[in-house]
Image (cartoon, helix red, strand yellow):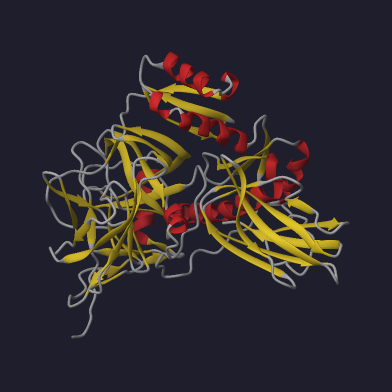
Amino acid sequence: MQRRRIAVAAAVVVAGGAAVAFTLPSMAGTTPSSKTATKSGGVSAQILAAMERDLGLDGDQATARLQRSKWASRVSARLAAQTGADFGGAWLATDGNTLKIAVTDARAQAAVKAAGAVPVLVERSEQSLVTAKEKLDSVRSEADGITGWYVEVSTNKLVVVAKPGETKAAKRLARTAGVASSAVKVVTSTASPKPLFDVRGADPYFIAVDGGTARCSIGFSVEGGFVTAGHCGAVGTTTTGFNQQAQGTVRASTFPGDADMGFVEVNGNWTPRAVVNDFEGNELPVAGNTEAPVGAAVCRSGSTTGTRCGTILAKNQTVVYPEGAVTGLTRTDVCAEGGDSGGPWLSGDQAQGMTSGGSGDCTVGGETFFQPVNEILAAEDLTLVTSGGGAAEPPAEEGAEPPAESAGACADQAVQRSGELARARTAQAQPDGGAFRSNAGTQTACLTAAEGADFDLFLQRLTNRGFRTVASDTGAGDKELTFNGRSGTYRYVVVATSGTGGYDLGFSTP
């Protein structure tokens, strides 16, 4: 039988909640029912139209903003590694064009300006604020009256979100966790976030739950299946497709806790495709997974409310749901409703995440949280199915110069560092004896040593027990390293196994 494809739309429903839907695996023996979205400047016309409606941008402005966001992602990732322990965070200003980079050392401002961004001198590094947030995470069971907390890089504070009348409870929680009051900002909100799923039967894909059947949205196609929200089924749960045919099995699921993410492995009748259903008869392309910065425009597609757009407000937020706290979510001002949950978020044609939960609706507005897609790709070693391509990088600010980096054998890497090991069996940490923040995704590195010397390369990630090696290259000759990992604080360690002399290290972050 000839295999033909049809886009599959999946959606989770929650009574009174927010949600998102998505298209992905196609099924054998069916015919196409949707058309490929027309693209303008590499961006789907449907995405541009949604941005015009929700953000008040015309087509050219929307395209420019998305291109600027991709440029800002690359520049902020490079500067995070380049400035190391001095990095205080990155965000796009409200104009959607000005990239601001916070640093704790005035000497680092020159590198920020050279990259075309605006430096902001702050008191606390992003890592120190993340450490403070993790202290709150450790006492989350005591978070009565609190709905969440997150690092707000634009104010250089740890924000605690309290219910009305619970400001004292928020301050008390911070004290209990050992977080200095000077680093804390308390805001109040009437919103009560909740996961966006329901137990009433309807189309797209289904899972059996106690007392009935739950309906969930497919997130993004990956090789062998799709990713979705973790609250949409425990490991081992079987799924049924929109057509009531056997579809797959949940192979990974986290909820609540460190994430709200899941992976469903599909059977041979389903073919993952690099598209998203906009529920208007079009397929939106998925070209990659470059993570957009705070302040960037973002859109989602849902079976209840269609395609809606807004702005990324914060990352790595801990959200307190009735089922328990979930860390690492991204907060947005995009509206959503029941039936939209579990599905995909896009910045242009770049995959961002899958809907977790939220509050409000598309009549009065609200806020919605999504699980970053790069986290599950890294944690489960999954490969996103993409169409490839994407918008070109726009020029830097007028008058900006490229960062002054040393040229060497690893000159193709974004960040360059050199050093010297004068004795065998000694080591140096890079960058500059410190560490750097990295988004989830693939990191690469290259090391060359002086003639006659054998230097080894280690990549280490900071954990609650200190730095732990996550990747290494200890063979003979020049070293090359590739690692696909979760977001966090990392450092490279160069070790003189034998011989002495200088070395050149180049590395890049997602």
Q: Nearer the viewer, residue 91 or 139?
A: 139
For this view, does 36 lie left or right of residue 178? Answer: left
- Percent across and percent down for residue 403 are 74, 55
Question: Can the viewer see residue 153?
Answer: no
Q: Nearer the viewer, residue 476 or 167?
A: 476
Q: Quadrant of the N terminus?
A: bottom left
Q: Nearer the viewer, residue 479 or 192?
A: 479
How many marks on residues? 0
- Percent across and percent down for residue 137 are 46, 32
- Does 490 sit above or below residue 240? above
For this view, does 493 lie left or right of residue 372? Answer: right
Q: Nearer the viewer, residue 116 or 459?
A: 459
- Does 391 sit above or below residue 139? below
Residue in view at x 49 percent, y 53 percent: 291
- Percent across and percent down for residue 206 are 18, 55
- Does 449 sit above or below residue 252? below
Extreme bottom residue here?
1
Where, by quadrant of the figure, is residue 277 drawn? bottom left
Where, by quadrant of the figure, is residue 445 drawn? bottom right
Q: Quadrant of the C terminus?
A: bottom right
- Percent across and percent down for residue 142 are 40, 23
